[in-house]
Image (cartoon, rainbow, N blue to C red):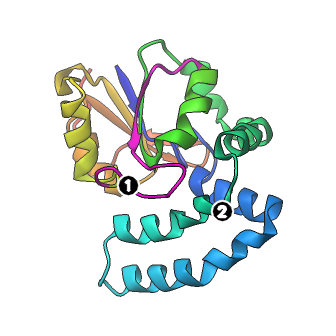
Amino acid sequence: MRVYDFDETIYDGDSTAHFFFFLLRRHPGLVRFLPEGGLAFLRYKFGSWTKTQFKERLYRLFQGVEDIEAEVAAFWAAHRTGIKDFYLAQQAADDLVISASPRFLLAPICADLGIHHLLASEVDPQTGFYRGLNCWGDEKVRRYLEAGYRLENMTDFYSDSFSDVPLAVRAKRAWLVTGMDIQPWPGHPMEA
């Protein structure tokens, strides 16, 4: 089984940030949520809030969107071209995507691509509140195991971020994705 991070790995950019700005362009009144999001960002950067707390406050913007599912569909209609060619060329039926981005945002594009295995942050699309922790770092390993997947079945892991070391070190082979460049994960003892 090949396991992929999503943002900056198989998608060219940060899908959550792209979706956030997509919403702001389509619904300018959502700017009313920005001061609170900016303050949350500062609290996160200075260490008084966790990443989950920061994102949850930022995601309150979703409360100002009447039909979030329609907005997600419109977003992917405009951004599907962001899926990287390397992924489309090697895609397999048992691929798994694991991401810190919200599940409600990634589920439609994964379904469209034929990706049947998705683990992501559980965020309520109506309120922006998390159900559990941000799916990031060690939490990705916990979610992977909790979902019943076996580490020994992870043949390859792809990510753009060293925050994914906890999964990368457990894969038989790990790949660092930088833009369109894919290199062996630094220091990983690649198995044949």
Q: Is mark 2 on a helix, strand or loop?
A: helix
- Please identify the quadrant where the N terminus is shown: top left
Residue 132 lies in the magenta stretch: yes
On the image, numbered disc 2 is attached to which residue? 64
Residue 57, x across and y down, in percent:
46, 70
Residue at screen point 59% across, 60% down: 63
Camera sees residue 188: no
The image shows residue 41, relative to residue 3, as above or below, that is below
The image shows residue 28, relative to residue 106, as above or below, that is below
Going from N to C along the chain, the mark reached first, 2 or 1, is 2
**Are dots 2 and 1 in contact, CB under 8 Å?**
no
- Structural crowding at the residue carrying mark 1, measured as other residues with C-alpha within 10 Å and reported as few (<14), some (14–19) or many (≥20): some
Residue 168, x across and y down, in percent:
28, 41
Q: What is the number of the mark on residue 130? A: 1
Report whether 43 appears left or right of 143.
Answer: right
Magenta-drawn segment: 114-133
Dot 1 amino acid type: Tyr
Residue nearest the viewer, comparing 13 with 58: 58
Residue at screen point 27% across, 25% down: 154
Dot 2 amino acid type: Gly
The image shows residue 66, relative to residue 157, as above or below, that is below
